[in-house]
Amino acid sequence: MFDELRELYQEVILDHGKSPRNFRSIEGARYHAHGYNPMCGDQLEVFVETDDGRITDASFVGKGCAISVASASLMTEMLRGKTVEEARRMFDGFHEMCTTGGDDPLAGFAEEDADRLQVLSGVREFPMRVKCATLAWHTMNAATKGIDEVSTDDGLGAG
């Protein structure tokens, strides 16, 4: 990874990890799920509210390592204004970027979204941390499919 991208990765993790955005529950949210990573003890609840098919609010609560919290914080910022289907496509691209890299897993994303997610691609260098970075995304994806609980022991992520 380029030194600049590595430095940006560390800055984003520190910033969002220390001052997470949207760290709160949403009472009566349309979608809600609990995610657990027993490997490192991360536990998150993700809340997604929609109106007329678009995500109007997204938040999370829980505890986890800086990577897990930063990824959840970044995700909740990015989901607003997206449709649930767009959010699921973002999950697929983000997961591929973190696990395999793929040809261009973020192709078709808005440039700003792709740039923000690309910063977290550095997690691929640390296979044990992939589940930390993808936990919130798996939890959001499960919630939008009506699944109340998801665990990284269910085969989520890599590492």
Image (cartoon, grey):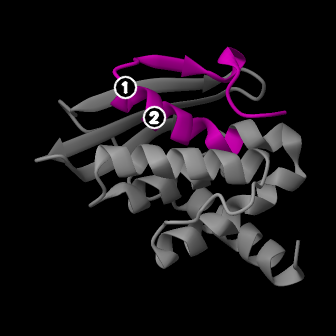
**Residue 89, percent from left and from top:** 47, 48
Residue 102 location (% of width, % of height): 75, 54
Identity of the residue drawn at 70% across and 26% down: 41
Q: Is residue 125 above or below residue 113?
A: above
Considering only vertical position in the picture, is 23 above or below 147?
below
Residue 143 shown left or right of residue 100 in the figure? left
Q: Residue at x 38, y 54 (%)?
A: 22
As drawn, the residue found furthest toward the bottom would be: 4
Is disc 2 surrounded by few (<14), some (14 to 19) or many (20+) residues within 10 Å?
many
Look at 41% across and 53% down and name the residue there. 76
Whether label 1 touches label 2, CB < 8 Å: yes
The reply, left or right, for residue 108 in relation to residue 12 is left
Residue at the disc numbered 2: 141
Tell me the tag on residue 14: none
| Amino acid type assigned to the residue bearing label 1 in the image | Lys
State which region is magenta. 132-159
Determine which quarter of the picture holds residue 42.
Answer: top right
Residue receiving disc 1 = 145
Query: Does 74 sit left or right of 146 as displayed?
Result: right
The total number of labels drawn is: 2
Circle 1 Cα neighbour tier, 10 Å, few/some/many (<14 / 14–19 / ≥20): some
Residue 140 in magenta stretch: yes
Distance CA(mark 1)–CA(mark 2): 7 Å
> Is residue 33 shown above or below 65?
above
Question: Is residue 61 at least partly visible in the picture?
Answer: yes
- Location of residue 30 in the rendering, given as x and y in whole percent from the top left corner: 21, 32
* Placement of the C terminus among the 4 image quadrants: top right
SS of the residue under disc 2: helix
Mark 2 is on which residue type?
A: Asn
* Image coordinates for residue 106, horizontal then vertical, percent: 59, 62
